[in-house]
């Protein structure tokens, strides 16, 4: 539990049928949790939310929000358990988590300023699923911070239409992106959208003068350090 991956980034563990990671980001007194996977019976630790609760309490940290990189069950299945353990921390996701016409309609969306002004969880939720309030943002970039350190949620569909990449302290958690050429594109994301997503990340780096030097698979089965992000993304276009 709590493997140090990079400064301010810890891997809590890998859980569920296909071993999705839960990630913990922190800087100074603020923190965030990334991913809420399914929890398989074979897991040694059945309740990572409780482990995280104890850790946050012991470290005297403020949990600013919880999020997921996309809506697939291996990343978002246990959101009700996380809400039950952290009822005051908003679960914040992109509105495209709810593109399925069978999903309830997103009523409103929130900007980064709404997260900074206090507890977003006290506001009217964007949508309720299984009676759990969820808060949505729109657009390509949600720019916030942990203790003053920039944190970006980048809506960049490639694996699926809800893909949200997490950029923090020069590292990017890449959802289930296939990096490099040869992506089989099982979910049939339009190729034009994929190129646009690649351009979105490159534009973030250019406009913010931001260097992404490491990329981590959300499932924590691939870690690439000291990369050239522009070269890697150009290799990914084919």
Image (cartoon, rainbow, N blue to C red):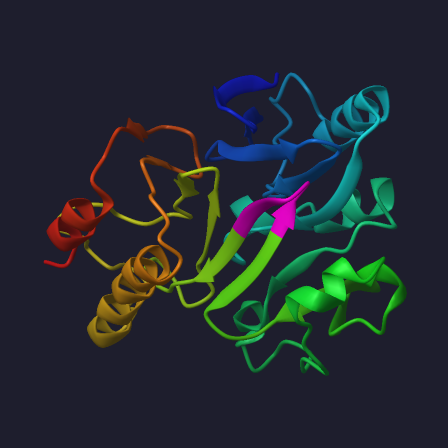
Q: Is residue 209 magenta?
A: no
Rendered residue at 38%/47% (across/down)? 176
- Asked whether residue 110 is in view, the answer is yes
Image location of residue 177, percent across then percent down: 32, 50
- Asked whether residue 16 is in view, the answer is no
Image-based side of 214 in relation to 112, left or right:
left
Q: Quadrant of the N terminus?
A: top right
- Depth check: give the residue in front, 213 or 234: 213
**In this picture, is 6 found above or below 123?**
above
Image-based side of 212 in relation to 152, left or right:
left
Image-based side of 167 in relation to 92, left or right:
left
- Depth check: give the residue in front, 225 or 206: 206
**In this picture, is 222 found above or below 62?**
above
Rendered residue at 32%/29% (across/down)? 222
Rendered residue at 47%/65% (across/down)? 162
Q: Give the mark count.
A: 0
Rendered residue at 33%/44% (across/down)? 211
Task: Check the image and name the residue furthest to the front.
Answer: 209
What predominant SS class does the magenta segment belong to?
A: strand
Residue 159, image quadrant: bottom left
Image location of residue 77, percent across then percent down: 63, 49
Image location of residue 193, percent across then percent down: 28, 73
Q: Is residue 150 magenta?
A: yes
Q: Which region is colored magenta?
A: 145-151
Residue 155, image quadrant: bottom left
Image location of residue 61, percent across then percent down: 79, 31
Residue 212, image quadrant: top left
């Amino acid at each position: 539990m709590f493997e140090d991956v990079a400064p301010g980034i810890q891997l809590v563990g890998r859980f569920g049928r296909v071993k999705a990671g839960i990630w913990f980001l922190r800087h100074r007194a603020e923190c965030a949790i990334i991913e809420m996977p399914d929890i398989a019976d074979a897991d040694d630790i059945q309740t990572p939310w409780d482990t995280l609760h104890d850790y946050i309490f012991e470290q005297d940290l403020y949990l600013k929000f919880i999020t997921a990189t996309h809506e697939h069950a291996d990343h978002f299945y246990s959101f009700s358990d996380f809400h039950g353990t952290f009822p005051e921390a908003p679960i914040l996701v992109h509105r495209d988590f709810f593109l399925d016409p069978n999903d309830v309609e997103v009523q409103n969306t929130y900007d980064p300023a709404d997260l900074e002004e206090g507890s977003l969880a006290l506001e009217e939720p964007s949508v309720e699923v299984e009676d759990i309030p969820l808060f949505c943002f729109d657009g390509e970039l949600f720019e916030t911070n942990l203790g003053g350190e920039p944190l970006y949620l980048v809506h960049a569909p490639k694996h699926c239409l809800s893909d949200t990449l997490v950029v923090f302290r020069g590292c990017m958690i890449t959802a289930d992106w296939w990096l490099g050429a040869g992506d089989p594109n099982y979910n049939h994301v339009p190729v034009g959208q994929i190129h646009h997503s690649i351009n979105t990340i490159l534009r973030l780096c250019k406009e913010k003068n931001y260097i992404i030097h490491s990329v981590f698979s959300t499932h924590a089965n691939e870690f690439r350090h000291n990369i050239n992000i522009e070269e890697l993304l150009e290799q990914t276009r084919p």
